[in-house]
Every structure is written in C-alpha cells, then in structure tokens.
Image (tube, rainbow, N blue to C red):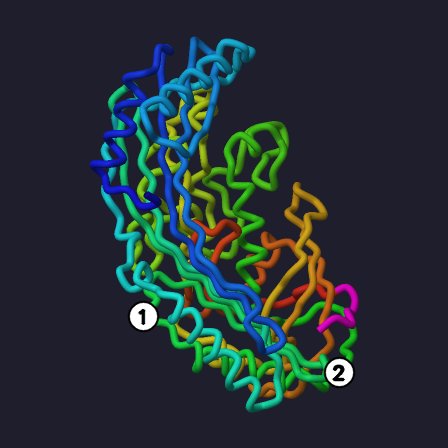
Amino acid sequence: MSILTEAQAKAILDKVLALSKADECTASLSGSIDGNIRFALNNVSTSGIVSNTDLAVQVAFGKRTGVATINEFDDASLERVVRRAEDLARLAPENPEFMPAVEKQTYTPSPTFSESTAAITPEFRAQVAADSIGPCKAEKLIAAGFLEDGQSFVAFANSKGNFGYQKATAFNYTCTVRTEDGRGSGWVGRNLKEASAFKADSDIRTAMRKASESAEAKALEPGKYTVILEPAAAAGLISFMMNFFDARQADEGRSFLSKKGGGNKLGEQVYDPRVNISADPWHPGAEVMPWDNEGLPREKMAIVENGKVVNLEYSRFWAQKQGKRATGSPGNLLFAGGTKSTAELVAGTQKGILVTRTWYIRMVDPQTVLLTGLTRDGTFYIENGQIKHPVKNFRFNESPVIMLNNIEELGRPVRVAGDESSFVMMIPPMKLRDFTFTSLSDAV
C-alpha cells in the first residue's frame, strides 16, 4: 500500500475531512518504497527495502491546533486519528501566530518521477556494489559506499477545498576509497533523477584516482590561498548560508542580511556581481515538488541577481505581519556559473589548492555566517595549471558571504544533494581567492 494512486489517496483524505468536527482540518498522506545497499572494506554489509505509508491529520478550533498520525486506513482507524487530533487541539493553548489552512490553490505539476529510478531492483543495487568494489580490489584499494534510492508519493487536502498529489523518485550514491595503509582517500558522489544515467564502474575511477594520488600528502603552511572548491565542497558552505535567507530572521536582527537600525538588505549588493542564485521547481534535471510544506505553490524566482539580494523567504505569518505576499519556500537552489569543468579551472590556475570535499562544518558567527570545518578525501596543491602534489587536510574558518565576494571564476554547475534528501542543488566548481585555512589536520 506504500504508493497510492491519486484516486486512492483522495478517497482516504475525503473520508478524513468528512469525519472532522473541528473548525478546519488538513490531512496529509505520504508513502515510500526505499531501497539501499551499503558496503565497506570491499564487502557488502547491509541491504534492504523499507516501505511505509503515513497519514497526518491537523485540526484547529480557533487558534488551538492538534496533530495526530497513523498508518492504518480502515474506517475505524481514520475516525480514531481524527478524534485524537481534535482531543489534542482542545487541550492545546492558543497559538498567537496561528495561520488558517490555505485556500484552494492551483499547482503546476513538475516531472519529479523517473521510471528508471522507480524500477531499481535488488540486482541493480548489488551490481552497483560489485562495480564499485571490483575495480578497487584490483588496484589494492578499499571501498566503502552507500546507495539509496526510492519512489514516493505525497497527497494532501483540507476543508477549504485545497488538494495536491504527486509522485517522485530519488537516487543518491556516495563512495569513499582508501589506500590499504589508510594514508590516501578519495570520494565520489552522484545525486541523480535518472538511475539509467549512472555508471558506477566509471564513476568509481574518480575516487580511486584521488585515493592513490593523495597518499603522500605534504604539509603546507596554513594561510590564505586561492582555492578551487569542487561542487560538493562548495555545497556544504552555500547551503549553510541559504538558511539565513528568511525575512523574519533578517528583520529581527538575527541574520547577516539584517540592517543596522532595523530592516533587511533586500535589494542591496551583498555579493560579487557574478553571483546569481535562483529557484525553479521545473528546472530540467533538478525538478522538485511544486508546493512547499505549507501547501503554497512554488514559483520560479530569482534569489540573488548580479550580486543583489532580490528575494527573501516570508512565512505566511511574517508576510501577513509585514504586508508582503507569501510565496512557496524554494525546494531547489540553482547557482549559475560558466562552462568550464573542475579540470579546466585547475588548468587555468597558477598556484592554488583543490578541495574535493568540506565536512564537519559548524557555525562560528551567524551575523557573518562565519563557518569552520575541514577538508577531506583529496586536497591537492596546484602549480602552473597542474596538480603538483597532495597536501595534508586543513581546518578552515571562512564565511561564504566573504567567499562569494572573492570569486575569480565559476565553472559549470552540476547537481548535488542538499542538506535534506528532498532538496536539490545545482552548484558550480568555484575558483576563489584568499580562502582562509587556519590549521592542519592529520585526518585523511
């Protein structure tokens, strides 16, 4: 029962709405079939399939709300979950920021479902593991990776006549390759819409090459360097920064987008003019659901245009308070770039450092988005357009706001996974000057 058709989902939701005695009711159904395979030390360790379907019911009496969930769908169970939500609502205190259910909306479907990804079998997953492990064994390297894939649906309805239904698929693969002595490490990751576009036996070569070539790492003095951040390395910093594009945080003085004396920096030049960030639920290769968690339709919108902040995210409550129009929160992030690959950026660099990944990123100062973290899985010194030698990993202290004012060149954007499984990012490799490395790390 994990993947319901639109008709099946609507039938259940209609029953729930009819059962409710509250002032308003919103019901949401979601289901998924998720498969995975995990391997480590060149052996498969776990694999499996998990399926689930859940119903969540939220009701309101005035400004008092209650929520209850269940995964049984017979008539008695549906009535039980509605009554439970109503009982909780009656006990709840009034919410001073309560917003009523959204009115009936119009959603433009986005192509979030892939037949090739939905058709993945246990045999497919086993072959991915074999194609990752085999080449590593042959070169006396050690692979550890994880493939997770799935198909899902979401449907919702409320007592004001709003309804939405859509199916989606997901595919995410990562693999870390180490040398036998543990001194070299490489990594590859692929987040795709179409499983048919994935070739583990060729993609694994990237991680293998970096593992072999990073084994004899040399220490380099910490300091400010020109860096080339591969898309996965840049994504960790950019996604942190985008969490502060909330209008309320900015207006209340809790963000780098807050203005001294009150207000926000909407319309101001914050970045290098080459920074252009947008959201588009229908963008080819990065499609996401056409609504957000509140049921508002998502729109194609510019967020940063030629370095100026042109859109902030307004919740329905904050939009009403500030006299603004609420729009659906973005489900993807599209960072515009150029046409060059990472290798081409390296070829055009006199001196610099290539960073494969950033990890263990933590906030130091939210007012400037100063972050600290580490490089990993292949950090290399560049000289005269060539990879000269591997270097020991660094700890960095850097703000993506400052980073995006120190751009030398942007490459071709590629799809990477964001900080949530449903969040998609298109991020280019970035050549940046004066990136701050504060100390060395012995970790590989």
User: Is residue 427 visible from the viewing direction of this image?
Assistant: no
Give amino acid for label 2: Lys
* Location of residue 329 with respect to 199 vertically, above or below: above
Label 2, label 1: how many angstroms apart (C-alpha)? 40 Å
Is 440 contained in the magenta span? yes
**Relative vertical location of residue 277 with respect to residue 230 in this rendering, above or below:** above
Crowdedness of circle 1 by 10 Å Cα count: few (<14), some, many (20+)?
Answer: few
Chain part drawn in magenta: 438-444
Vertical arrangement, residue 269 with respect to residue 49, above or below: above
* Circle 1: residue type: Ser
Residue that numbered label 1 is attached to: 196
Quarter location, residue 101 = top left
Taking depth in this image into account, of 206 and 156 the one nearest to the observer is 156
Q: Residue at x 73, y 84 (%)?
A: 181
Q: Is residue 334 left or right of residue 255?
A: left
Residue located beneath label 2 in the image: 218
Tell me: 74 left or right of 248: left
Of the pair 387 and 402, the residue shown nearer to us: 387
The verdict on residue 137 being magenta is no
